[in-house]
Structures are given as structure tokens and as C-alpha cells.
Image (cartoon, helix red, strand yellow):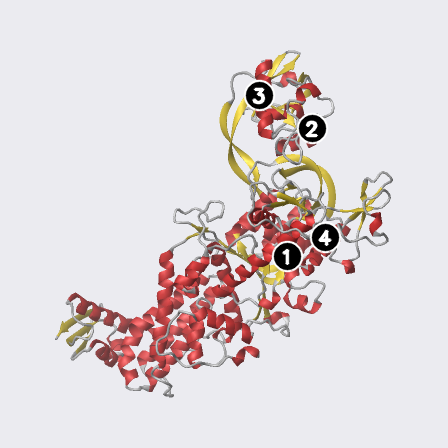
Amino acid sequence: MTQQRLRHAAMPEKPTLDGLEQVWVARWEDEGVYRFDRTRERPEIFSIDTPPPTVSGSLHVGHVFSYTHTDIMARYKRMAGYEVFYPIGWDDNGLPTERRVQNVYGVRGDASLPYDPEFAPPDKPGKREIPISRRNFVELCHKLTAIDEQAFEEVWRRVGLSVDWSLLYTTIGDDSRAVSQRAFLRNLARGEAYLAEAPTLWDVTFRTAVAQAELEDREWPGAFHRISFYGDQGPVFIETTRPELIPACVALVAHPDDERYKPLFGTSVLTPLFGVEVPIVAHRLAEMDKGSGIAMICTFGDVTDVTWWRELGLDTRSVIGWDGRLLPEPPEGVDGEPYKELAGKTVHSARERIVEMLRESGDLDGEPKPVQRTVKFYERGDKPLEIVTTRQWYIRNGGRDQVLRERLLERGRELNWHPPHMRVRYDNWVEGLNGDWLISRQRFFGVPFPVWYKLDGSGNRLHDEPILPPEEMLPIDPSSDVPPGYTEDQRGVPGGFAGDTDVMDTWATSSLTPQLAGRWETDDDLFRRVFPMDLRSQSHEIIRTWLFATVTRSHLEFGSLPWSDAAVSGWILDPDRKKMSKSKGNVVTPMALLEQYGSDAVRYWAANGRYGVDTAFDPGQLKVGRRLAIKILNASKFVLGFGDVGGEVTEALDLSMLAALDDAVAEAGRAFESYDHTRALEVAERFFWSFCDDYLELVKARAYEGDASAVVALRRALETQLRLFAPFLPFVTEEVWSWWREGSVHRAAWPQAAPGGGDPAVLTVASEILRRVRKAKSEAKQSMRAEVSRLTVTGPEVALVRLAQDDLCGAGNVEEFVLEPGESLTVEVELG
């Protein structure tokens, strides 16, 4: 295989960690060490669905934390005999990219503007964004993502991810767009995707629809306004934080058991200022103990309004437009004279004006009472979401289909979760769905829907007569491509066609990462070798989005899970134990840490975080990791300095050490198979420090004398320990391996326990006695080479100690060694 071309190099006089990353990243790539061998059959392959990071700025240590976990498992499985399919991609379409382009270049997309081939963004963006055509905007998106992707790749290579870079994909690339569009067309053909006009959560800043999975609850300041409606039996007072929606009011609602309002059910009242007659209705979701106990239903103020509107069959009076301002014209039946005071205003300004009007009319009872309330936000947005009526694309996900919901819950039970309790988050999300998955976005930089519409004689779109492309035509852009049977001059004219202007939500593409990486429908041979995959690795906050969406798409298309196992990393917290995020300004970027401490040290820190556990960032762990890497260099140089003398391991202490190492190998292997990389590292590290602090000191004298048993045992232990550490510390282990072995340690076999008859207890008791001798010298403030005139050891392990007696005398510089049986181990040290 190509990776076996790696040849060993001479051991340096003064080993150093500095520069190892640049050397080995280049050699691994040149020699194809991590290149996937696609001749292997599916049972021999371990395939990984790697998260494609969002290319919208810079990576932070949280990314390094979770991606290192995946790489550790990939490296272990490769050494365990599997051919590892380990691709990587860039998630480079969607709102994060668009927002970054707006900020960097000071522009915004405007679909009404023509393309300008000569456009160049200003050198210094001004305060006001420059409107540019959709095509110009998309070109800037491609330009910026290319720059960001180069920086991302530099970080990932420096971290030592053992991905096969020849398998790189981008979610906006031609292949990915074809996969996304093909999957959508098949969803549509099976009735799983559909177009519907309905109330939609809307971000007024980005002017796009938002899905349930992208919502975030935030505390937001507001005020309760007590307002009177006019009824035949006197005023009815409601309390609301959104008085600007009074012109959108379609009913008042109270709980059916509320004695205060039972007499009013079935009657009607007039809205203040506008005089619109609205009914008083009963519904179980009304809260008797909130405010006055009766609320106004508006179309639409929040998701509860939508539920009431749908279940009670109420009228629709929309007043908020896509730009977050009140519409220029009032809803049908609403008096235009008072409404003109609100038309065109932002929600905030309209609220202020209508409060003034209510105060003047006497309909405001008392003054507004400030309150903090929980409001829905788009997770990347800055303003509260509104609800507007729009036509959107959806994919069925069990939100409105109990049978499908139960099937997807069953898929969650089929999946192996690491750690197991993460399945609860999946179950809670699926059980709490209140609607299907909204996948369309009113943006520019994304995968277009492969749909055109026929136009009637008046130029109106016939949404129930979509024109769909054949799959072999994919990918397409309906804004520039022409449907079969039409010509470009029929675009936008009566009797012709028009393209769908929306793009897919980025999750609609990312939910297909197994298909994207496996080249679904374009490379059948590869796809059958890697799908369904073995591992999905990700963080826990996107179980509701990425994991669930991928399970849904795989279930609908293939009738199976997309992978057998899911390993879920925790968050990285700042020293105050708050989640690191760019919005909070508490992130730590990784490159400076990689340069200061070395990549192996950063990986060591990451490896000390278990799956599913939030971990505080601790620079102290980086120092420990660097110290470990340096110790591996120095200890390896010491061991290899004795040369290869040949022979067999015969001495009891050497056999004992190898037996203890066999135990460590077995325990580390079990930990890896249980997805507990942290335990595997703990085992390897514990043995290594014991090996350096105790065993090396005990056998040093024999090794210097050329004792074959000691030298062979040292070299065998070193080889095994390099392989134990290789998944965690790939650079230093590869460097040492190259001093005396051909090929790459990362293609070497995972060590196997090979019992040789040794008793680990010999090394254990000898190490304990040596520690006590050292302690006695230290307390006497003498050198570790100071002579011990008499060493007396008493205890039940006398027979074991006798097997290591000569080595203890050499290591402790002992003149007289006395062994006496006893009930417990005691060590008496008489210094010369």
C-alpha cells in the first residue's frame, strides 16, 4: 500500500516538538497515509459521517474539541484493522454565510436588480448596505467562502485530522446541489414534500421563514397594556403586550371553565379605535390566572394565536409585512382612518403610536406595566420573530402524522447512542413537534428548489401545476435554467413559466451528508461500500436539527437509519462555565494555542473530555499535554539509545512490566470499543508514567550493561505504548516511530495483549518500595543517588520482592538488602 513508502529517519540529537506538525502533515498527504482504499468490502470498512463545519468566520476551540473526538475514534478503528472512510465537507450555504458577506462587504442582495458584471465591493464598507443583484451577491458569497475554507483547512490539518482530503465536498457545490434536488424531487413524488400557504415564523431582518428547530427562547422587555373592548354588557378588559395588533384582532378568548366569562361566550364585542365586531370564544389554552383571564386572538401574534385561529376557524386579518412593518393598507373590514396612523411603521413605532391613540380615546386603563417575557427568536437573529402568512415548502417529519412520528421514535431506539442518555433529547424533540419541517428560505445563497410554475393568461403562478426537471438535468437553477418544452423568452410572460425563487434551508442539504459524502446515485460502487454508515459524531444542541433531520431523510428514502451509532460531544465552557459562543464574545480561537503548546497538547486537552459532558476550557491541561508529549520524546530516545541487542525477555521484573502493559492494552481496547476515549487515554497515560518513573529507573543499570532481557522489554514496551498513544498524540508518536520503524504508526495494528507468564504484582511492589526509598532520601535532603546502607523490607510479598531484588539495589544504590516475612508491607531505609 502507498502508505508503506514512509521510511524511518535518523534519531535527532535533541528531539523537539517544534515543527513536527508541518513535517508530518505534508508527509501524510504526500504518502496518502489516510487515503481511503475503496477496494475493501463493506464489513471491512468503518465509515464516518463527519460534521461539515459552517464556513462563516473562524473556528474556535469548541470545534477542535468535538472534531478531535471523532478523529481519535477514526485513528483507533484504522489501527484496529478497518479501512476508515473519513470524509470532510464545508457547510458553505445559508444565512450565516450571507450575513458574513453583508458584514464584510457592506452589501445586501436585491432580487429586483440586474446583474452588474463590473461590480466590485467597496474597499471600506459604509454604514448603509449597498443593494446588489442576486447573482452579484452569490458571487461574493463564493468569493468569501473560498477564503474562509482555506483558513479552516489550515486549522484542521494543523490539528491532525486524519480525514481523506480527496473526499472533500461543499454543500453549495454542483454534486451537493444535485443530491439535494434529487432527494427533494423524490420526497415530492412520494408526497413527503408539499407546498402550502400558512402562518409562518418570520425573521424580519433576514426576511425569511424559520423552522421550529431553529427557534430560541429569549427574555425580552415589554409591557402589559390593559385595554377595554366594547360589549353590550359593558367593557371587557384584556391585557396584552402587543397593542399594535388590535387591527389584526379576530376574537377574544377565555377558558371554558372561567365563571367570569361563561355568560359572554357566544356574544361579541367591538375592538377599540377600529370598531370591528369580534366574537368571544372559549378554548382550553386560555389561561385563567394570566392578566384579566381573557385574551385577544390576533392573526398572528404568537404560535398560540395560530392554534386558536386554526381550531376555531376564525377570520384572517394580517397587518405585519415581510419587512416587519405594518402593511400600507388595513385588512378588510378595518377602518382606514385610524389605521393610517400605523401604516408603514415598524412594530415598535406602531406600538408607541397606538398606545397614544388608546390613551386619547380613553380605552387604555391605567399605564402600561413593564414586564420581561419569553419571546421566540431565530437562533441567529436579533429581533423577535413575527408570524406572517406565506407559501412555503415542507417535508413531513411526524409533526402532523402520528404514525410517522412513532416510526421516527422507533428509529431513535434502534440507534446506538454514546452516551445513552442523549436519546432522551431526541425523543423529547420528536414528541414535541407541532408541525412539519419548513425547508424553504427567502434568501439567495442556497440550493434552489428545482421547480418552475406555469403562468396563466394573466401571468399568475399556477402553484398546483409545477414543472419538474428530469433527474439527469440536475443540478438546475430555475432563475436561469429553462424547463423542458419552454424557451427563455417565455419566462415571466402570461402563458409561460416562472422559476421558484426560494432556496432550501441549509439543514435540508446537511441532512443528506451521508449521501453527499458517499456520492449517492453518482458513484454506486462507493455508496454501497459506505452506507449505511457506522458513526455520526456531533454536538448535542443539534440533535433536534442535524441528527433528527438526517434520520428523517434516510427513513423516507431508504427505510433505514443512516448510521448505526451516534457519538455526541458536550459543549466547551468558559472559566465561568458558560457556553462559548461568538455572540457572547467568550470564544478562544485555536491557532494561537496550537502554535504555543503544539497540536498534540491541544488534542490531549480535548481527549480528556468525555462524550456528552460539557467541559470547561482549562489551559492547565494544555501544559500537561505538552509535558506528556515531551516526555514521550525523551523516554523514547533513552530507550532506543540502547540499540537492538536481540534476545528474549527472561527476567521476572521485565516479564512483570510486559504483563502490566498487556492489561493496559486490553483495558484501553475495551474503553475504545465502548466509545470511552477518555478512559483509554487515562489507561495509557497511567501506565506510561509508571513505566518512566519506576520501571526505567529499576532496569536502567541492567540496560546500560547490555542485558538482553531489559533492552528487548524496553523496546517492546515502547512500540506498544506508541501505538496506544497514536490516536491521541499523532505527531509525537509518528515522529518517534519514524526513528526506528518503517511505515506509519497510524497504519500499524492496534496492539494485542500477548500474555507471557509475567506477574504484574512484581513491578507493583518493586515500584512501591522504590518510591519509599526516594521519599526517605528526599526527606533527608539527599541526592537520589545517595547510598542506602541497609534496606529492610517486611511483608507478605517477600517472594515477589526477591524477584526484583537486584534491580532495586541498583536503582536505590542499596548496600545491604534484608527481606523478612510479615503481615503488611513496611520499608525501613538506613542512609549511608
Q: Which residue is mark 3?
A: 355
Query: Callout 3, which amino acid?
Result: Val
Q: Are marks 1 and 4 in contact (CB under 8 Å)?
A: no
Q: Are marks 2 and 3 in contact (CB under 8 Å)?
A: no
Task: Report the quarter where the C terminus lies.
Answer: bottom left
Name the mark nearer the viewer: 1 or 2.
2
Name the mark nearer the viewer: 1 or 4.
1
Q: Which residue is mark 4?
A: 184
Q: Nearer the viewer, residue 290 or 56?
A: 56
Can the viewer see residue 510 in this picture? Answer: no
Residue shown at 58% from the left, 27% from the top: 349
What is the secondary structure assignment of the residue under circle 1? Answer: loop
Q: Which residue is mark 1?
A: 171
Name the mark nearer the viewer: 2 or 3.
2
What is the secondary structure assignment of the residue under circle 3? Answer: helix
Q: Position of residue 263 (x, y in %)?
A: 64, 16
CA neighbours of label 4 inside 10 A, class few (<14), some (14 to 19), many (20+) = many
Q: Say whether disc 1 or disc 2 marks the residue closer to the N-terminus.
A: 1
Q: Nearer the viewer, residue 246 or 324?
A: 324
Q: Which residue is mark 2?
A: 328
Q: Position of residue 170 (x, y in %)?
A: 63, 59
Marks 2 and 3, Cα distance to the nearest angstrom?
Answer: 19 Å
Q: Are marks 1 and 2 in contact (CB under 8 Å)?
A: no
Q: Say whether disc 2 or disc 3 marks the residue closer to the N-terminus.
A: 2
Q: Is residue 614 left or right of residue 497?
A: left
CA neighbours of label 2 inside 10 A, class few (<14), some (14 to 19), many (20+) = some
Q: Say whether disc 3 or disc 1 marks the residue closer to the N-terminus.
A: 1
Q: Say whether disc 4 or disc 3 marks the residue closer to the N-terminus.
A: 4
Q: How many numbered marks have been drawn onto this rendered protein structure?
A: 4
Q: Are marks 3 and 1 in contact (CB under 8 Å)?
A: no
